[in-house]
Image (cartoon, rainbow, N blue to C red):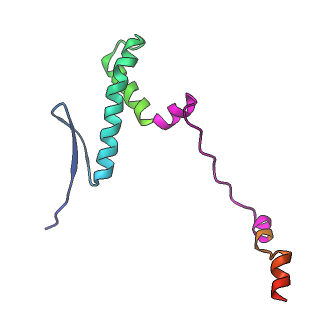
Amino acid sequence: MAVVTQYVVIRDGAEKMTFTSKAEADAHDKILDMAEALNPLIKSSELFTDEQQLEDMALFLAKERENVLIALGAKKPKKPKTEKTSAEKAEAAKPTDKESTKAA
């Protein structure tokens, strides 16, 4: 028989999600906290009359917080890593003049 540790996120007495790692459960709980904090702000816009749409938008914005911060200019986007071409790799592998004179 196997023993499995599970982490359950419970909000307002209802089970929201179950995770196998504490870090994942904490991350989801943090997203729910952010969505809860965004709810009054979004509600004040009066753009959403349906409560479910309001909650869905708050949850979406919380999940996409990195992109929201970038869009607001509060955070800079990460630069994508570019792979070196084979010519650049060969050039980087060549010994410099100093290195070749030391070997001689």
Quarter of the image that includes the C terminus? bottom right
Q: What is the total number of numbered labels drawn onto the structure image?
A: 0
Please give the name of the residue rendered at 31% of the width and 27% of the height, measured from the top-left corner. 36
Q: Is residue 18 above or below residue 54?
A: below
Which residues are drawn in magenta?
65-90
Apparent side of residue 39 relative to residue 12 in the rendered image (left or right): right
Quadrant for residue 49, please give it. top left
Q: Residue 102: x, y in percent?
A: 81, 84
Please give the name of the residue rendered at 40% of the width and 10% of the height, measured from the top-left corner. 46
Q: Residue 85: x, y in percent?
A: 75, 62
Quadrant for residue 35, please give it. top left
Please give the name of the residue rendered at 31% of the width and 33% of the height, measured from the top-left corner. 33
Viewer-closest of 31 and 49: 31
Q: Residue 10: x, y in percent?
A: 20, 38
Please give the name of the residue rendered at 78% of the width and 71% of the height, measured from the top-left corner. 90
Quarter of the image that includes the N terminus? bottom left
Q: Is residue 58 above or below residue 77?
A: above
Quadrant for residue 45, please give it. top left
The residue furthest left is 1
Whether residue 81 appears in magenta in the rendering, the answer is yes
Q: Residue 92: x, y in percent?
A: 77, 69
